[in-house]
Amino acid sequence: MRGKIIKGIGGFYYIACGDELYTCKAKGIFRNENIRPLVGDNVEISVTDEAGREGSLDDILARRNCMVRPAVANIDIILVVQAFARPAPQLYLLDRYLISVEQSDIPAAIVFNKSDLRKDDCDRSYADAGYKTFSVSAKTGEGMEELRRFIEGKTIALAGPSGVGKSTITNALCPEADMKTGAISRKIERGKHTTRHSEIFALGGDTYLCDTPGFTSVVFEDMETERLRFHMPDIAAYEGRCRFSGCRHINEPDCAVKSAVDKDELARSRYESYIKIYDEIYIQERRY
């Protein structure tokens, strides 16, 4: 029998097969071969207890794509969520995460939530960079209808730091999900972790939404300094326009990227993120 993993907790996988939900344990071969079943995986199962809706996860079908953070598979688009305020937008973390999504060859869009608390236009630089960007308030409903139309017919994963409103957005898009929403610590304005595992919700019409745990860091393990510039579309757009072929946009003269920053044609915050990440990866390369 074939189905889709919609949730995984404590070694148990909850697999939707049509209108039925089965609780399955993965065969030992997955552990022996260091293969981790992921939420979103299409799988084959054997039913061991029809009355109790229990089974064995036998095989994972070929994946279209997958990510480690969040641990999901077969996603059409990653919706990266940030908040305009409470907590304050973490644009450097956002830039890091967008690069990691780019590495996975999964399209990314950005949702800036809590537009009712908006203090600036930090979303504009990402729209200018070529990202599909939404300004919404899951609390008031502002912008949510446009977001609903965008995700229709797609399998979407929500990702972002804790406290930005991923679970509140999930509740607004899929009320039956009835997710717990966390309070923000007034002292440190940091979200408390409310989502402990990735879970897929069916919104109808072949639309699926995956809410994922929050994160506070992104680690680059396989990135090379020479490839970094191609994973930031607004910087990649200047490829071939610099004086030197293969310009790294760091110290080279007549650099089109640095010129664009000076002319406010490229967001300085994005270029500063590029420099910081480049330096980090360069140090890793020198170390090994």
Image (cartoon, rainbow, N blue to C red):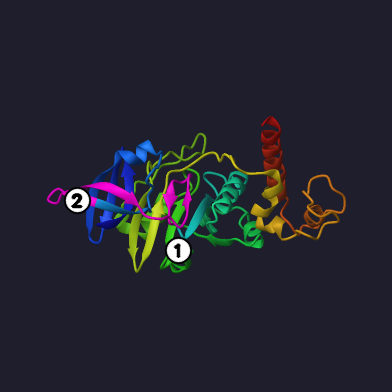
Q: Where does the image place residue 85, in percent across and percent down from the top left?
A: 54, 48
Image quadrant assignment for residue 275? top right
Q: Nearer the viewer, mark 2 or mark 1?
A: 2
Q: Dot 2, crowdedness within 10 Å: few (<14), some or many (≥20)?
A: some
Which image quadrant: the N terminus? bottom left
Residue 251: x and y in percent read: 83, 44
Q: Which of pointers 2 and 1 lies earlier in the amino acid sequence?
A: 2
**In the rendered image, is residue 114 in sight?**
no
Where residue 84 appears, as percent x and y from the top left, is: 55, 51
Q: Is residue 195 left or right of residue 250?
A: left
Q: Which mark is residue 144?
A: 1
Residue neighbourhood size for the residue with mark 1, other residues' Cα within 10 Å, grouped as few (<14), some (14–19), many (≥20): many
Residue picked out by circle 2:
47
Q: Amino acid at mark 2?
A: Val
Left or right: 103 as drawn, with respect to 5: right
Query: Which residue is rendered at x = 23% and y = 61% of the image?
Result: 19
The answer to whether residue 28 is above or below residue 246 is above
| Rendering quarter of residue 127 | bottom right
Q: Is residue 72 magenta?
A: yes
Residue span colored magenta:
46-74
Q: Is residue 84 magenta?
A: no
Task: Kindly indicate the quadrant of the structure image that contains residue 233.
Answer: bottom right
Calculate the distance from the C-alpha at mark 2 to the C-alpha at mark 1. 40 Å
Q: Residue at x 55, y 39 (%)?
A: 217
Considering the numbered disc 2 on the image, is that residue within a helix, a strand or a loop? Answer: strand
In this view of the protein, which residue sits in the foreground, 54 or 189? 54
> Which residue corresponds to the image point at 68% horizontal and 30% vertical from the top-left?
287
Q: Position of residue 221 (x, y in %)?
A: 58, 39
Amino acid at circle 1 = Met
